[in-house]
Amino acid sequence: MKNLLLSFLILGLIFNSCKNEETQKPEEAKAKEEIITETKPDSATVAKAWIDYATPSKAHEMLAKDNGTWNAELTFWSPENPQEMKSTATVTYKMIMDGKYQEGIYSGDMFGAPFEGKGMVAYDNATEEFISTWIDNMGTGVLVTRGKYDEATKTSTFYGEMVDPVTKKAKKIKEVITYIDDNNQKMEMFDVLENGKEFKTMQVVSKRKI
């Protein structure tokens, strides 16, 4: 008898559970439908978002101020060699793709050998950050850094990561660009060490030529 009563009790619980599930399903479906309706933008909103994304902003206007040719003095430091090394280069900046990206072409002499490099800087309207890429003939990799501009200090600070060709290990990089005035800039590059300290590896002081 006890087993029979237990069976009826279990069947009753299952029936009630199914009944509750059935009554909840329309409400759940309605809730999901409302969420989809709320999150799905209309065509006008989508079009405006893409137009805003593709339209150069004030940040792009700031990059465009660099257009022209600059003379650069480069200084290098190494933890293994306390003596600094110097070099010179010329860089030409121009905005490409209707003012959306800044292209920088570098040429000069590096440790007694011809040097050429190419930088590309974008300002992503969606993420509201600068994205920089760098390649040169002194290696085969691509350095990618991301950063923000601080109006109060007139500096842009970028962070990235590269693989040290000697140790084959990744290391963090910090780059700071100081806009002294419209015709003078300073770029400083740092290795971010494992203990959190920074070691300055390079400095580029640029002066507008044209």
Image (cartoon, rainbow, N blue to C red):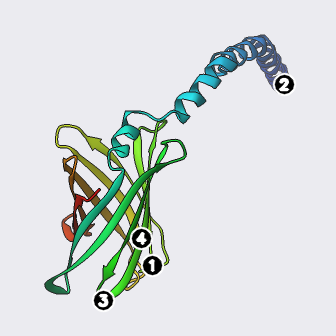
**Which sits earlier in the primary sequence, circle 2 or circle 3?**
2
- Position of the N terminus, as image quadrant, is top right
Label 4 element class: strand
- Three-letter code, disc 4: Gly
Residue that numbered label 4 is attached to? 117
- Residue at 42% of width from left, 33% of height from top? 57
Asked whether residue 57 appears in the rendered view, the answer is yes
The reply to whether callout 1 and callout 4 are in contact (CB within 8 Å) is yes
- Residue at 18% of width from left, 65% of height from top? 197
* 101 w.r.t. 151: above or below: below
Q: In which quarter of the view is residue 18 placed?
A: top right
In x, y percent, where is residue 206?
A: 23, 61
Residue that numbered label 2 is attached to? 7
Using residue 38 as the reference point, say whether residue 179 is left or right of it.
Answer: left
Residue that numbered label 3 is attached to? 112
- Three-letter code, disc 1: Asn
Mark 1 → mark 4, Cα distance in angstroms: 6 Å
* 208 w.r.t. 38: above or below: below
- Three-letter code, disc 2: Ser
In x, y percent, where is residue 65?
A: 32, 44
- Three-letter code, disc 3: Gly
* 59 w.r.t. 51: above or below: below
Mark 1 → mark 3, Cα distance in angstroms: 14 Å
Residue that numbered label 1 is attached to? 137
The reply to whether callout 1 and callout 3 are in contact (CB within 8 Å) is no
Mark 2 → mark 1, Cα distance in angstroms: 80 Å
